[in-house]
Amino acid sequence: MTLDYKGATEKYEPTLGLEVHVELNTNSKMFCSCATEFGAEPNTQTCPVCLGLPGALPVVNGKAIESTILIGLALNCSIAPYSRFARKNYFYPDMPKNFQTSQYDEPICVDGYLDVEIETDEGPKVFRVDIERVHMEEDTGKSLHVGGSTGRIHGAEYSLLDYNRAGIPLVEIVTRIIPGTGKYAPQVARAYVTQLRDILRSLGVSDVKMEQGSLRCDANVSLAPIGSGLLGTRSETKNVNSLRSVERALTGEIERQANRLEAGERIIQETRHFLEESGLTRPGRSKEQAEDYRYFPEPDLVPVTPDAKWIEELRAKLPENPADRRKRLQKEWNVPDSEMNSLINAELVDVVEETIKLGAEPTRARTWWLGEISRLANEKEVAPTSLITTAFVAEIIALITSGDLTDKLARQVVEGVVNGEGSPKQVIEKRGLKVVSDDSALMVAIEAAIAAQPDTAERIRGGNIPAAGALIGAVMKATGGQADAAKVRELLLKHLGQG
Amino acid sequence: MTNIHSTAAEMASALATKEISSVELTKQHLDRISAVDGKIHAFLHVDSEGAIAQAEAIDAKRAAGEKLAPLAGVPIAVKDILAQKGIPTTAGSKILEGWRPPYDSTVVAKLKAAGVVILGKTNMDEFAMGSSTENSAYGTTQNPWDLTRTPGGSSGGSAAAVSAFEAPLAIGTDTGGSIRQPAALTGIVGVKPTYGGVSRYGVIAYSSSLDQVGPFGRTVLDTALLHEVIAGHDERDSTSINAPVPQVVAAAKKLDVKGMKIGVIKELSGSGFQAGVSARINESLELLVAAGAEIVEVSCPNFEYALAAYYLIAPSEASSNLARFDSMRYGLRVGDDGSKGAEEVMSATREAGFGSEVKRRIILGTYALSSGYYDAYYGSAQKVRTLVKQDFEKAFAKADVLVSPVTPTTAFKIGEKSNDPVAMYLSDIATIPVNMAGIGGMSLPVGLAEEDGLPVGLQIMAPLMQDDRFYRVGGTLEAALLSKWGKPILSNAPDLMVQK
């Protein structure tokens, strides 16, 4: 009998471990001044240093150290007053020196944590994820194996190498083992990576694009019978390229391991590759015979010894934790969880906040971004923020609030701005969209409507308020729909002694 | 008359007064190379065209009245371990055959900027691993004093070129004695500067924490002039020292050691050293005393372990530094017949491209760094390194400079030690502690050994970044020796134009 996920987690306790690699968005590489832009022609962003030419020497990118310290501080780590680079030795064609310059037993940031909140059957619950270390290293080049069926080096006809990525600064963030998540393990992992991504984004140190590989997660998991207190053999799943995949990969892997254990088979310590299509993992390199990387301190680099004053300056510069900020904004805006989640999922929190800062009325700011602008963005299959600036949205909302635009007219203004007809002001002018709010102009229309329907006017004077609809409709028709209906109603009723 | 037998300082002043042009001087040296290098084999590549072009450019600048650096127009030979743009650079290895670097090492760039004319690249033990040039993949260099003997190594080609008047100056590298030992064996001056004093950028790495580039010359002043051209902070080498370059030229000219304390290292004297070597060293000490210096004895008990520790640290770093030679991007490629995978081609290339001494050190280093052995080997060796540094610190508390013989013996016969690695390693016993501590040292020719008539070198060592001290002592002693001999030591060497 095979176990499904529920069955698996009723019998086995998963233990997680997550390694996240982040490509920093520095302008130059970790150890040379080559550009780091994504998507350039292969091998155009290289030099003797990142190609590992004989005689070339590395020099550490100070900006990368600063970014790494910022990450460490944001993750509540201690910053080592003395840390060193080490060489990790192994042969692979996409590694120009056949060693990777990394950090080994003396990483720059240690002993941090990140609290992540998930929804459980009993409501929201916070899990503390302990961070073991945050360290710096250089990325490898990229191999493209051509021919053969697997896309892997074995069986390929030939391989192409692109060293543009070689030497891009990478930060590796390693958790301690995360016990006690039970059936929520995949959710905790996803929440952790999500929150980590948000923190990295708020620090401005990385593009954090999982699909481009600037944020990569290796998910380790092992199972042990519940209550056994044991730690099982783990597998490490790579190629997890989205937040959703983090959750799916772990769910699948927990199921797979549980069923192997049920069948009396043992778990092999190995690297597995996540297959996006099926949600399953396939075996990769076995780590049964642990590779000996012959680490030793990198003699070409001097130790990293950031001074305490600089670290405190960086700490003072840390932005508000994104999770805290959301809680604060939700409270300030007084919105329900569902709406806050919609804003978060649509990645609109920042723009809404900015729009409000520019003077827009909070409710309208949320409604416009989440409603009309998102709708247009969906139609065009682009991000809402690429359609219109926060300043224009704030300007339009201000006009609504002051009564110069109706919602209906405002939608036309937004459409005009999105279509490139200019600023809100220019669109209003070109399309002639200004609300008719001049009382005397409206009074002329109202009096005309009363004169045309004297019986209706009499009924209203007699207290039949709903009858006003007919006269309001007539006024709106006469003004080409540009009058503010509420204003018309107010003036009409007042004129007929009912205001 | 200025000619190839002049000192570099004399050449520089003759060039400055336009007594001779750089083109004439360069041609004289190229002619000398054509005439004698068939016997010496100091050069792996002679860049006649490039040298003449560089000399012409300098002459033109001088004619135009431009201000030039002191050594502008003087020729030089460069060890084939320094990258020079467009010029074959092999590090004495088959694995780099045909590689032409797309960039200049910092030292080569500095030489070019100072207008020093680069004649070509000199022979060396493969990847600087050796003490005789016998480990070169391109044949052995012969010692100009006796063609049946080695010039020492690994910078044997550079030392032989200067000793044979093929170049007045040369660049070498010194990881465990590779400048000082060949200087001693060929009767010239060689200096290993303080680690970090000269940039390593563009120097093909053997052992990164020990490698250092340095100058060769026939006199202390010539060596100092070259030292000042190549030294200084380089932001492309993280280990280069960001401090003013010691004033070595001024020190070389000082000719005064009154009141200086000269420490004789007990462990590097007496037994284990050839009698004729010890005799010349003692004679030098007497001359220094006569010049007003004081001799003190110092003890460095941990030097005993330095050689063993060196043969763990250097191979460990080498095993990693040499990993890049895998045929994927440059150099030799063997076995790529379309049927083999990358790993097989890498393996076949390294099997065919590396010589046996290089393979021996890669295997040694790989083993020493392996998990489970790291602490016992690499870890212990690093501790010895600390102890050697402490020995030096204590000794320098008692003396301004320390002295010892450079080598246990004078130049040995080609083939004499090539099948006995440990005997070969022992020829660096007195030079290795300097590299372990990162300090600088000079090899100064102090006469010929009675028993074989071959040159003997005195090693003078100074604390970190106090390189001027050994230039001061070396310059003073050189002057005393010259006045005693009445002629330069190299005038005792056989005439290569008639020698068979």
Image: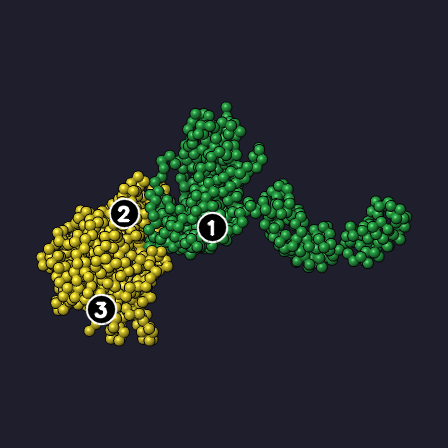
Chain colours: A green, B yellow
Q: Residues within 10 Å of mark 3 (few under 14, many from 20)?
A: some
At 42% from the left and 37% from the top, the residue drawn is A271
The amino acid sitting under disc 3 is Lys
**Is residue A422 toward the left or the right of residue B383 in the image?**
right
Q: Viewed as shown, does residue A51 lie left or right of A480?
A: left
Which x, y percent locates residue A447? 86, 55
Residue B268 in view here: no
Location of the C terminus of chain B by quadrant is bottom left
> Are circles 2 and 3 on residues that touch, CB within 8 Å?
no
The answer to which of marks 2 and 3 sits earlier in the sequence is 3
Which mark, by number, is residue B383?
Answer: 2
Residue flagged by tag 1: what amino acid is it? Leu
Pick the front one: B61 or B434: B434
Numbered label attached to residue B254: 3
Asked which quadrant contains residue A61, the reply is bottom left
| Image location of residue A248, percent across then percent down | 52, 36
Chain holding disc 1: A
Amino acid carrying mark 2 in the image = Lys
Quadrant housing residue B202: bottom left
Q: CA distance from mark 2 to mark 1?
A: 35 Å
Residue on which disc 1 sits? A70
